[in-house]
Image (cartoon, coloured by chain):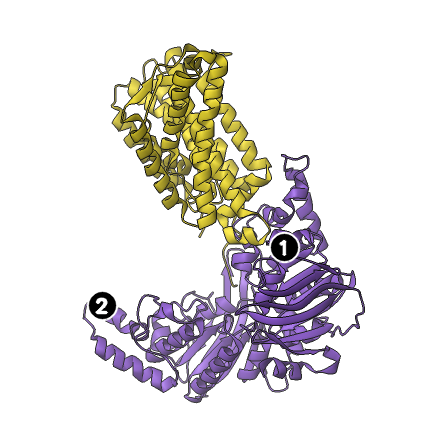
Chain colours: A yellow, B purple
Amino acid sequence: MSSASAPRRAFRPGADTLEIGIMALLLVASFSFFALMAPGFLSAVNVRSMAVQLPELGLLSLAMLVPIISGGLNLAVTFTANIAGLTTAWLVQNALGDAGALGIIAGIGAGLGVGSAAGFLIGVIVARVGAHPILVSLGAMIFLQGLGEFLTRGGGISGMPAGFQWLGSGSLIGIPIPMLIFLLTAGGLAYFMQFTRTGFSIHMIGSNLRATEYSGIDVRRVLIVLYTLSGLLAAIAGMVMLARFNSVRVGHGESYLLITVLACFLAGANPFGGFGRVLPLVLGLMSLQVIASGMNLMGASQHLATAVWGAFLIVVMTLRMPFLKRS
Amino acid sequence: MDDIALRAEHVSKIFGQSRVLDDVSFELRRGEVLCLAGENGCGKSTLIKILNGVYTPEAGAAFSFGNADAVSRITPHDARSLGIHVIWQDLALFPHLSVAENIVFDDYVASPFRPLSRRAARQEALAVIERLGVPLDPDSRVEDLSIARRQLVAICRVLRAGARIVFMDEPTASLTRNEVQTLLEITRSLSAQGISIVFVSHRLSEVLAVCQRVTVLRNGALVGTYSTEGMTQTRLSQLMTGRELMLTPRHAACSGDPVLELRDLSRTGEFEDVSLTLHRGEILGLTGLLGAGRTELAHVLFGMNRPTGGELLKNGKPLTLRSNRDAIRNGIAYVSEDRLRLGLVQNQSINMNTAVTVLDELEKPRGFLSPQRLRGLTADWIRRLGTKVSDAELAVSSLSGGNQQRIVLAKWLATKPDVLILDCPTVGVDVGAKAGIFEIIRQLADEGMSIILISDEAGEIWMNSDRVVVLKAGRISRELTPDATTEASLEEIINA
C-alpha cells in the first residue's frame, strides 16, 4: 500500500454542507443563548440594531473572502472603503450638491469606481509583478491611509443629504436598507463564485496557480478581476458606513480588518486558498453580531465581546479538525 | 543457513476491513540485491514497514536473522540493532544542515546534550564518503545539492549508522539516466561489501540490470521469487499484473497530411534549429537525455515560451503563439510531465479538473456555468477512458497515478485537439496502467490525432512510435523508424 489513507474529500459538497451546518448550529446556539439570557434581546429595537450594524463588517468580510479563496489577502479593504466614502462625500458636498438624486447616484458611482480602481491596482501588481498579495495589499493599505490623511488633513467629511442618509437608516419591506444591500451583495457574490468561469478559476488558482495557468486559464486576468471585485465590495461597505454615520474619516473601521480575516476562517475558508463559501460566512457573521449585541445587552464590555470572538474561532477550528483531516 | 540475512514467514497485515498482506514469505541473502516488485497497492510498502519495525504484523509471523532464534515481530529497536535501514523516496534529510552533519546525524540523536565537535563530525563523514567513493563535499548544505547527490548523502548516512540491510524505495524515480547508472554502480559496490539491498522500482529495466532476484507481490499476496537471469520485462510485468499485457510494437507506416511543421525552430540556450513535420494520425516519439531540450521544445509548441528563431506552421499556415491559450485555440494540447504540480490542481475535485480547459463551452448561456453540464462532461470522459472513480466530487489527489493521468488526458481531449503533446505520460504510473494509457494513445492516433510522445524510456518510445526523433544537446541528432532498429540499439543511440 503506497497510501493507506482514506480518500480525501474535496470541500464540496459534503464538506460544504458540513461548514454550513457548523455555522448554522453556531448561530442557533448563540441566538438561543442570548434570547434566554439577555434582557430585551428579542425586542424589535435590538433586532433592528443588529441588522443595521452587521452589514459593515459583513461587506468588508466579503471583500476579504474573494482574495482568501484565491490564496491571497487584501489588507487594504478598510482604507479602500474610507477612500471610496471620502470620494462620494466630497463629490456630493462640493461638486454634485445641486444635482439632487442624480448627484447622489453619480457620487456613489464615483466612490465605487475609486474603490474598484484601488483593487484593480493591487490586482495588476499581483498579476504582473508576481509579488505576494500580502505585500502588495499592505503597501496599498499604507498608501491609501497616507493619501487619505494627506487629502483630509486628518479630519473628516460629515453632513450628507437626507436622501443619502436614507441608505443607512431607511427600510424597505421592513428590512433595514444596509441589511438589504448586504444580503443582495452576498447573494450576487455567491452566484459569481459558484456559477461563473471567473469564480471557478478563482478557486483553481487558490489551490495551484501554475497548474491553472497550464490548463489555459488567463490567471493574470482572473487575479486582476478578483482584486477589482474585492475593491468594489470594500467600496460598497464604504458607502454603507458613510450613510449610517453621516460622516467619513480615514481610519474609520480600521479595527475591522483582522476581524474580517477571522470571520472568513471561522466560516471554513482555507488559509492556503482554494476553498471558502459565502453562505457559511454570512451565517458566521450573524453569530458574531448576535454575540456582540447579546453581551452588550447583558452589560458586558465591547472588548469582552471581541475576546469571545477570538475564543470562538479557536473553538470552532478545534471542533472542525477531526472532520477535515487534510495534509 | 548462514547466508540468509533476513527471513520472514507468514507475514500478514490487516487494516480495518482489508487484508493488505496475506501470508507473505520473504527471504534476503547476505550481500544480494533483491527487487521487491509489484503494482501500487500490492503491499510492498506495508511489508517494508513491518520489516523495519514501523508496523506490527498479525500474529503468526516469524522473523529470523542468520542463526538467531525466530521472533514474532521486529521492533524499531531490533531494526536498529540489526542494521535494517530504509531510504524512503523523500530521503528524510535535513536540508539546512551540512552533508557531514547529516551523515553523522545519528550521533546527535544518541547523545543529544553532548556537544559534538564539528571537526570530528567532518572527519567521520569524510571517511564514509571515501569508503563509498562518491564526489561529495562534506561542507556543502544539503539543500544546495541535486536530488542525486542528496541520495548519496542518505546512503552515506545509513552506512555510517552500520547498515547491513538497506531498503531503497523508488531510488531512481527522479534521477537522470547517468545518475541512475551511478546509483546502480554504488548499489553493486555495497552488495560486494556484504550489505543486502532491497530495491523497489517501477522501472523494470533497472530492476533486471541490478538485482539478482526479484520477489513479486500482487494484491497483498506473494506471487513468487525469481532469478533475474533469463527474466524479461514483459514476463515481469505479467507476474506483477497477473495479466497478459498487449505490448506489441506499433510501427504503422504513416502518410497523412502534415499537421504541424517546425522550421529551424530555436530558443536560445534550450534548443537550436529543430525542423520536424508531424503528420495526421502519427505518433512521433521524441526522446533524448534529460536536458536535451525535449520539454523545452514542448513548452514552445504549447505557447508557454516564445521561440527566438525559426517558424511554426499549423496545417500549412504560419502560427504565432503568444500564450498557451493561443495553442489550445489552435488545437494543441500538452500533458505535462509534472502531474503533481502542473498537470492537475491536486486538491480540487475531479469534476473541476476535467472541466477547467473547456469553461467557455460549459458557460452557456454566458454567465451561467451549469453544474449539470460540468458533471455530465466528467462522467462522459470517465466512461470513455475507463477511469476508476468512485465520486467525481472527490479531490483528484485521491486517485492512483494511472487514473490521475486519465483525468489529465480527459481534460485535454475535451478541448478536441488535433495535436497532443505527451511529456513522459507514464511517470509514476503502474505497469498495468501504463499499458492502458498507451492503448488510449494508440487509439487516438488511429482516429486521426497527431501525437508527440516524449519519453526517456527507450522501450516505450520504440513500442509506440511511428517515427522517432532523438534530441541531443538541443539539436536533432537522429531521426529513424522503429522498424529499422531494435529497442536495445535505440537505447544506445539515446545514451550515445
- Extreme-front residue of the structure: A95
What is the crowding at mark 2: few (fewer than 14 residues within 10 Å), some, or many (at least 20)? few
The answer to which of A120 and B256 lies nearer the viewer is: A120
Q: How many callouts does the rendering have? A: 2
Give residue A22's mark. none
The image shows residue B69, relative to residue B409, as above or below, that is below
Q: Amino acid at mark 1?
A: Ile
User: Which residue in the structure is indicated by mark 2?
Assistant: B112
The image shows residue A104, relative to residue B212, as above or below, that is above
The image shows residue B241, relative to residue A60, as above or below, that is below
Q: Secondary structure at mark 2?
A: loop
Measure the alpha-carbon separation of dots 1 and 2. 49 Å
The answer to which of A172 and A236 lies nearer the viewer is: A236
The image shows residue B254, relative to residue A89, as above or below, that is below
Left or right, B180 with reference to A140: right
Q: Amino acid at mark 2?
A: Pro
Q: Position of residue B298 (x, y in %)?
A: 61, 64
For the point 34% across and 35% down, the residue is A258
Q: Position of residue B10 (x, y in %)?
A: 51, 72
Q: Secondary structure at mark 1?
A: helix
Using the rendered view, name the quadrant where residue A300 is placed: top left
For the point 25% across and 23% down, the residue is A301
Q: Position of residue B479 (x, y in %)?
A: 69, 77
Indicate the chain on which mark 1 is placed.
Answer: B
Left or right, B194 with reference to B348: left
User: Which residue in the structure is indicated by mark 1?
Assistant: B407
Precedes in sequence: disc 1 or disc 2? 2
